[in-house]
């Protein structure tokens, strides 16, 4: 294959924007070199996002924590509309960094910079999984920050052991979250979330609201690895979908697939909001 043909084959379908304008190489290199920032990922369908307010609130709170700065949600939505021009359906990742931050200096005030990556819509995650539990806590677990080496390595270790993904436990053995997803359970018809420190994911929040609105009970409580043996259904969720857990370590969760079908129907009742 000629060199120019090889280069064309390597061109991505991803569209990149910095602060609402097509991204230049210098800005992309800044983001590539920086490990300091946060992001959210959402699925856009017909120009709308389910849980849009949750995503925007996440970005605003993390910007306050990491940069001691305010993020203008209305300006951000205008940038989203610009980045999505001509694409009614897409996967959209929004990352927040600081153009004046480097590994050597982090001056104040931070000069915020917004990177938007627009990809074709991603298929929903649906395949059942087996999880391997491991003792590990993400740094600042309440934030969806850019540090993911640790959880990617744990995911790889789980796969090498014949599992599909990793389940994170706190140092004292309490269930927290998955490598890149929240985890929930059902117990006596109640939706049960672990109480350990974790990211309050967008799908997690929408499910809780929809389940309560339908008259269901939603609880948060400490869950140990040993408690899992007394449960019969579990699931994973993030902005990419909602999928069943068939087993955690050696403990089967036989009712997970039927429960997930119920939850998917419930999630579909959440009205998407136009960008």
Image (cartoon, rainbow, N blue to C red):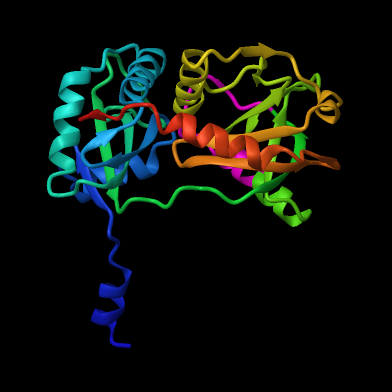
Residue at image x 35%, y 22%? 59
**Residue 142 belongs to the span the image colors magenta:** yes
Is residue 9 rendered to the left or right of residue 203?
A: left
Residue 193 vertical position relative to residue 158 in the rendered view, above or below: above
Tell me, yes or no, if residue 145 can be seen here: no
Q: Where the N terminus falls, by quadrant?
A: bottom left
Residue 17, x across and y down, in percent: 20, 43
Residue 252 vertical position relative to residue 275 in the rendered view, above or below: below
The residue most toward the bottom is: 1
**Residue 219 belongs to the span the image colors magenta:** no
Q: Where the C terminus falls, by quadrant?
A: top left
Residue at image x 45%, y 23%? 206
Is residue 73 rendered to the left or right of residue 258?
A: left
Residue 203, x across and y down, in percent: 47, 29
Residue 10 is drawn in which quadrant?
bottom left
Question: Which one is in front, 161 or 29?
Answer: 161
Tell me, yes or no, if residue 207 can be seen here: yes
Q: How many marks?
A: 0
Question: Which one is in front, 105 or 121?
Answer: 121
Residue at image x 40%, y 19%? 62
**Dominant secondary structure (helix, strand or loop) of the stretch shown in magenta:** loop
Residue 30 vertical position relative to residue 232 in the rendered view, above or below: below
The residue most toward the front is: 215
Residue numbers of the magenta segment: 137-154
Residue 244, x across and y down, in percent: 64, 41
Question: Which one is in front, 83 or 244?
Answer: 244
Question: Which one is in front, 97 or 60?
Answer: 60
Is residue 16 rendered to the left or right of residue 91?
A: left
Residue 37 is drawn in which quadrant?
top left
């Amino acid at each position: 294959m000629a060199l120019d043909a090889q280069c064309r084959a390597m061109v991505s379908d991803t569209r990149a924007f910095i602060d609402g304008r097509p991204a230049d190489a210098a800005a992309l290199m800044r983001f590539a070199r920086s490990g300091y920032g946060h992001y959210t990922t959402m699925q856009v369908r017909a120009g709308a996002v389910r849980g849009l307010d949750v995503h925007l609130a996440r970005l605003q709170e993390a910007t306050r924590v990491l940069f001691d700065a305010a993020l203008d949600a209305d300006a951000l939505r205008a940038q989203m509309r610009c980045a999505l021009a001509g694409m009614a359906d897409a996967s959209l990742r929004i990352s927040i960094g600081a153009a004046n931050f480097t590994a050597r200096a982090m001056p104040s005030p931070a000069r915020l910079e917004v990177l938007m990556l627009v990809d074709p819509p991603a298929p929903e995650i649906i395949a059942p999984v087996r999880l391997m539990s491991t003792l590990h806590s993400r740094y600042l677990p309440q934030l969806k920050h850019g540090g993911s080496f640790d959880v990617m390595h744990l995911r790889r270790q789980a796969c090498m052991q014949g599992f599909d993904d990793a389940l994170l436990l706190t140092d004292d053995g309490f269930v927290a979250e998955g490598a890149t997803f929240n985890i929930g359970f059902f117990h006596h018809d109640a939706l049960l979330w672990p109480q350990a420190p974790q990211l309050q994911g967008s799908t997690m929040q929408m499910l809780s609201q929809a389940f309560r609105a339908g008259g269901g009970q939603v609880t948060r409580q400490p869950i140990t690895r040993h408690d899992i043996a007394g449960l019969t259904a579990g699931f994973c969720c993030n902005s990419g979908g909602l999928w069943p857990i068939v087993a955690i370590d050696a403990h089967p969760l036989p009712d997970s697939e039927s429960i997930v079908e119920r939850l998917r129907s419930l999630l579909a009742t959440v009205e998407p909001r136009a960008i």
